[in-house]
Image (cartoon, helix red, strand yellow):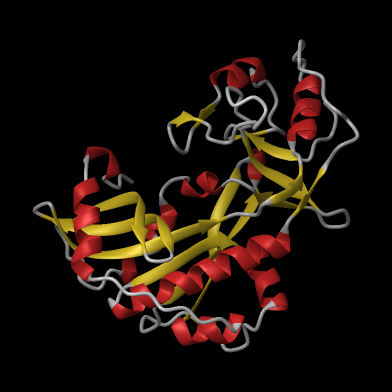
Amino acid sequence: MSRTRVTELFGLPTSVADVDWKSIVKRQRCPYLNRKCLKIRKSQPEIAIGTCSVSHGIRNPKSILICPHRMLGNGMIFMDCLHLLRLHEPGNELHKIPQIEIPGGSGDYFLASVRNDQVVDFVGIEIQTLDTTGTVWPDRQRFLQAAGLSNLDNFDGSKTFGMNWKMTAKTILVQLHHKIETFESLAKHLVLVHQDALLEYMMRQFKFDHIGSAKLGHSLHFHAYNFRFGEGDAPKLQLSSRHSTDADGMSTALGLQAKANVELSSIVAKLENKIAADTLLRI
C-alpha cells in the first residue's frame, strides 16, 4: 500500500492491515461520538471525511490530531480534570455535558459533579486540535484507492494540505481570554485540552514565560497530550504536561482586554437542564 499522510480514518490507523475499508467508509461512523462523523465535505454534506490525524513534517514526521473528537478517546481527558473539582465528593455522579453557552461563546464540555440531580461543582473544558490549510480530501482518496476501493469520485491528486499553526493558536487563546474572567469570577477552573505540539508552538510565538507548572489556585489550566503510535500501530494519547495561569496571565500573553461576568446560578441551571443518562461519565 502506498504511503499516506492520513494516519487515522474513522478511528482506525491506516497502517493496520486487513481492514475492510469499504465497509468502514460506508458506515461513516465516529467511534468517539458513537454516531456518524461530523467532519463532512462542504460540497457533499452527505459524505463524512473521517480523518482523525495526519502525519506532518519531513525530517521528523509527527502524527497531528486534526479532529477534536479524537481526544475524547477513553474519557481520560475528563478524568485528568477530576482534581479541579473542589467540591466533588465520593458518591457524586460525574457528567460530561457538551455545549453550554457562557459569555465569550460556548464551552465544548463541562465536567460536572452531581448529587441528587443537582450540580455541586463543575470544570469547563475546551478541546483544541490543529486546523489545516488546503484540503485533506486528496490524501484520503489516494489512501482508499491504494486500499483497493474502486468507483471513487475524481480528485485532484496534486492538491495537498498544511497545518494552520498561527490561526489555530491565536483563535483559541483569544477565546480563552474572553471566557476566563467568567470562570475566575465564579472561582471555577477552565481547562484547555490540546496536543503538546500546539503548546510548543504557542510557547514560541506568544509570551508564555510567566506561565509555569500547574497550580490549583489558577483559573486557567493547559493540559498538553502526547500522541504517538506504539506497538502494533495502536495510537496512544497520554497527558504529558500541565501548566496554568489566570486572567491577568492571559492578558499578558495576548495584550488584550475583555470583561465578562455571569451569575453562578445561570450556568448551573443550564448544566442541570442537560443532565441525562447519556451525559453520565463511564470509565
Quarter residue 259 falls in = bottom left
Residue at 43% x, 32% y: name it. Answer: 34
Residue at 77% x, 11% y: name it. Answer: 150
Q: Is residue 48 above or below residue 184?
A: above
Q: Is residue 74 above or below residue 4?
A: below
Counting the numbered discs, the total is: 0
Q: Position of residue 237 (x, y in %)?
A: 55, 53
Q: Is residue 112 above or below residue 54?
A: below
Task: Give the farthest residue toward the right.
Answer: 158
Please say whether residue 165 is visible from this viewpoint. yes
Residue at 59% x, 84% y: name it. Answer: 255
Tell which of 128 and 79 is nearer to you.
128
Q: Position of residue 239 (x, y in %)?
A: 52, 62
Quarter residue 1 falls in = top right
Q: Position of residue 151 (x, y in %)?
A: 76, 10
Tell which of 43 and 116 is nearer to you.
43
Tell which of 243 and 97 is nearer to you.
97
Please say whether residue 222 is visible from this viewpoint. no
Task: Give the farthest residue toward the top.
Answer: 151
Quarter residue 18 falls in = top right
Residue at 86% x, 28% y: name it. Answer: 156
Q: Is residue 282 above or below residue 108?
A: above
Q: Position of residue 173 (x, y in %)?
A: 57, 70
Q: Is residue 24 left or right of residue 166?
A: left
